[in-house]
Image (cartoon, rainbow, N blue to C red):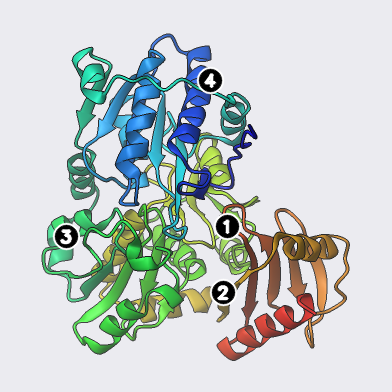
Amino acid sequence: MIIDKIKFGTDGWRAIIAQDFTVYNVARVTKGLADWLLNDHEKPTVLLGHDCRFGGPLFTETVAKVLCGNGINVVMAKGFVSTPMISFGVLQVQAQQGVIITASHNPPTYNGYKLKGAHGGPSNPADIAAVEALIPDTVDIPKQGLKYWEDNGMLRYINLEDMYVAYLEEKFDIAALNKSPFKLAYDAMYGAGQNVIRRLFPSAVLLHCDDNPGFHGQAPEPLDKNLKELAKTVATTPEIKIGLATDGDADRIGLYDEDGNFVDAHHIILLLIHYLYKYKGMRGKVAVAFSVTDRVKRMCEAYGLPIEVTPIGFKYISELMTKEDILVGGEESGGIAVKGHIPERDGIYDGLALYEFMTTTGKTLKELCEEVYDVVGRFVYERNDLTLENEKKEAIIEKAAANGYGKFGKYGFNRIETIDGIKYHLDNGGWIMLRASGTEPLLRVYAEGNGKEETLDILEDVKTTILA
């Protein structure tokens, strides 16, 4: 029998349901986790949950049975939960580890397994590698059901949603936000954030906030191409001034201004730095992944804030947040954390912070973006995900790593960085980046230019060059 080698990517282990993501493989991963925990803890506790994705309850039950069968106490969330709820909950119940069954933004055919550390954020890379090394080829799955473990005191349940909502009500003036002149529209993408916004903002316009484990066939990733209904709703409803979206496990954010224009993660990171520094008087280091715009460096220089660039994967930013005073940590993909919250990406928390920014200043997102442009200049960012055979994808990356591209169409470059992927700094002041996805069969092409037409033209020239 051929045994699958299970590898954790940039954010957990993900695989296609029933192909590699099976009950047995989930049990194997859990046995590795159990052995790792028992090496350092006599009676560890794990907080466990799942998002809205297909198979969540089944796979979560498997995790619980294997953990309990290995002498590990389990606290299990009732119903579906978001990834930030699990990270927040780890701190609340003082668990040694958190596990959430989720494939985040991946297509509906996938499911996944995320590890959350005792600090309330993604487990650090060294711990993830240690768990991965302990995953056995074979495993025994206890036959006893969950009731057995509950009766024996190994398993108990918790309502994380109630705890998380109460926490947000402490952190934000929800009553004031409900009276905001800027009406909110929210698209849950059929994901785990749907109940939270419904509870906090009864008058918000809600899209795709119902149970659909297959996400209506669409990857729940908060990109402009996946959020056309939200964009149209905002653009055609005069009283709606902000459109918020979160991904399948609600740790990533998507945003629209009052005209229905997409506000990407680069702008959101800049808006959050600007708000926390200039309006709230907060200080700290900024940590961003390699694929984030260099305009963040420009803002940090203007504000006298230190900055660190990390490899891609929020686990690197989260690890920094446990050691240093981080004001904002963020990724191009929409995963952003802010000071005063847990060291975890949280699309809802970030959205409320920006909603608060608008409400307290009386300014729209467009007006606030203009304030950002006054500091860093105007720019436009776009990303193109190319579905390619692995052989072709690897050949492109190998050629790029060997400096095999002299220019991309009409666009020359003057500097290359290789922290994680290959980033080309263009002669026109923009940049291009090539990187193979760590969780999907995709080659990601990132580009920034001085205007939308130029940025799209850059992407087209890159595509033509690398596929030639």
Say few, some or many: other residues with alpha carbon within 10 Å of mark 2 (under 14 / 14 to 19 / 20 or more).
Answer: some
Which disc, if any, is residue 198?
3
- For marks 4 and 1, the one nearer the N-term is 4
Q: CA distance from mark 3 to mark 4?
A: 39 Å
According to the picture, the residue beneath numbered tag 4 turns out to be 36
Amino acid type at mark 3: Arg
The span from disc 2 to disc 4 (Cα, nearest Å) is 46 Å
The residue carrying mark 2 is: 376
Q: Looking at the picture, how far across and down is residue 105, in whole percent?
A: 44, 58
Q: Nearer the viewer, mark 1 or mark 2?
A: 1
Q: Are marks 2 and 4 in contact (CB under 8 Å)?
A: no
Q: Earlier in the sequence, mark 1 or mark 2?
A: 2
Q: Nearer the viewer, residue 132 or 451?
A: 132
Assess whether mark 2 and mark 3 are in contact (beta carbons under 8 angstroms).
no
User: Which amino acid type is marked by label 1?
Assistant: Glu
- Disc assigned to residue 70: none
Identify the residue shown where x is 88% and y is 65%.
Answer: 403
Q: Mark 1 to mark 2: distance in Å?
A: 33 Å
For marks 1 and 3, the one nearer the N-term is: 3
Callout 4, which amino acid? Trp
Q: Nearer the N terminus, badge 3 or badge 4?
A: 4
Q: Quadrant of the N terminus?
A: top right
Q: Is residue 463 visible?
A: yes
In the drawing, does residue 139 fall left or right of residue 125? left
**Mark 4 element type:** helix
- Residue at left 25%, top 75%? 362
